[in-house]
Amino acid sequence: MDWKLAAGLGVLLILPFFVTDSYTRHLFILAFVYAILASNWDLSLGYAGLFNFGHIAFFATGVYTAAIAAKTLGVSPMLTIPLGGATAALTALIVAAPVARLKGIYVVLVTFAFSQVLLQLILSQSHITGGAEGMVRIPALQIGDYKFIRDFKFGYYYVALGLLVLSTFYLLWLTRSPFGKSLLALRDNEEYAGARGISIMRARVLALVASAIFPGMAGSFFAIYLRVASPEVLGFGTLSLVLSMVLIGGIATITGPIFAAFAIFFATETLAGTRGMEEFRFIIVAVAMILVLRFAPGGLARILQVFQFKKNRVL
Amino acid sequence: METLLATFVSGLVLAALYALMASGLSLIWTTIGVFNFAHGALMMVGAFVAWTVSEVGGFGLWPGLIAGVATTTVLGVIIEYLLIRPFYGQRNMVLITVMTTLAAMIILEKSAQIIWGARLKQLPRMIEGDISISGAVISAHEALIVVLAPLILIALWQFTNRTPVGRSLRAVGQNQEAAALLGINVPLTFALAFGLGAALAGLTGVLLGGIRFITPSLGSEPLIKAMIVVIFGGLGSLGATVGAALVIGMAEAFLVLTLGLYWTPFAIFLGLIAVLVLRPNGLFGRS
């Protein structure tokens, strides 16, 4: 692990001792959730080159797994977090079946259609899912008598940060492993990688499933933390927001989308409080996404790398 | 028997609507190879502009229609120039333009929210009154859509098959380099295709404004419907799009009758995934 990540982690670890108001902590908790979602999406988009729109569906699977398990079935909220990861992985396996055979735009269309299937299922099964109104008053996290919401969300902060740290270690380990390298080989030259004995189908299915686990857990945490599950998570709004984090941060970097998730989330939340900016902030994010695609296709992470490279060369 | 007829008629109305929604999307896909996610948002803009001109401005419906279509045409050309053209010839052009047009969709929707607000608006109908077809009652406006849709599509077909400009559109769609060698102005043709596709979106939006409430999210559902139709028909020809619109419209009407309102979209999306997996070139497409 390089020193910048370690420094970032150190700051985040001691932050709650300095930032004590519950609203700022709330923002950090949600930023952690978005960072998990964006960086895992990057595994399938950046590394596997799969342009899938399914990640919000994996996230939503986690949200509704937690909501139904904790509220309807009475499962302990803590357990619903790994459970959400498992159901999301299962969902990814189902999506992967058609995706493994398709290419390019068809992957976009099939995964988008799948998220719509999930949305329709949630809307139609209102006796289980609450339909368009969603589910409210989902049981909150507590151990013994200690409620995680207490002490200005102190507990929730560390659960979310823990999930992000685990997810980031997992992604960095995976992308540096032989499997991660085989994904890159497939993305850059499918025929050659195939000829060298990498199974395209197997790699795609694994990449999709591997990138669904943490978004599912983040979804479950999201539902338990906010105590709400709403079909809104499957809309174009969430999709484009997280996609912009991946693209602006820089695909195939893992850390880029994490930093971008923080930057974009805090920027949009700050603007939300500014009069006249409530809707305009989304336009700013969309324009930023277009500008990055046009002038810095590798994302902001790549720009920083180029600067470093130049600096080193001069020295 | 009467239920069947009523279902058939409502299927026909849906099919006509879906064919209109999908025509512009299909045209842009066949000529430029861009899947325009802003297509639905353009419908919404068309409806809002028509509403502003005819209701706020008090100029009446027809000037409103013309203003709506003109605005979306210009917007289409702008989108092509700013968000599509810079990416021509790139390896991942199809995927990059999915993202840029998605961004365009957000920009248009949020701008509409800022300009017109979230309050529900509605356009007057083109024709007032209802029409009864042996027991099945539909509004005259819907009947107009059923008549208008095939006419517009035939005109579009005639244009792309019979006129030199339309043929150059198809030539560019099939082989850009060969078309350029024949002296066709490829960039101009792209702009034309996008403008025409956006004009069709605007027209659809104005027609929708008479039967649905106009909100900034008016275009979301039509976009998804247009996507379904274009995918079912195969990303290719206009004729296949029309056929697919008929199949989907009828299937939806009869599924609502048998499966009910809630399971129908679910069944259609499952069918869509099945088609994409088994026949990626669409129901009527050639492999």
Image (tube, grey):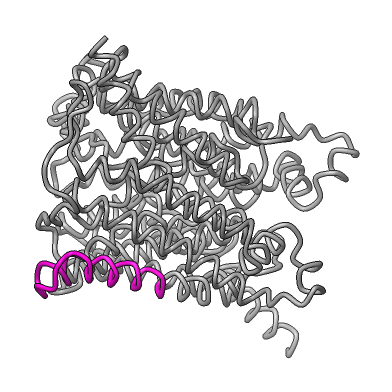
Pick whichever, A21 or B107, lies toward us.
B107
User: In the image, what residue occupies the spot 46% across and 32% down?
Assistant: A114
Q: Is residue A17 left or right of residue A4?
A: left
What x and y, as percent, mark residue B243?
Answer: 52, 34
Q: Is residue A205 above or below residue A126?
A: below
The quarter of the picture where residue B121 lies is: bottom left
The quarter of the picture where residue A260 lies is: bottom left
Q: Main secondary structure of the magenta part?
A: helix
User: In the image, what residue occupies the spot 42% across and 52% down?
Assistant: A35
Q: Is residue A63 above or below residue A34?
A: above
B60 part of magenta stretch: yes
What x and y, as percent, mark residue A82?
Answer: 40, 26
Q: Which residues are magenta?
A: B50-75
Image quarter (top left, top right, bottom left or bottom right) of the C terminus of chain A = bottom right
Q: Residue furthest right?
A: A195
What x and y, as percent, mark residue A267?
Answer: 30, 69
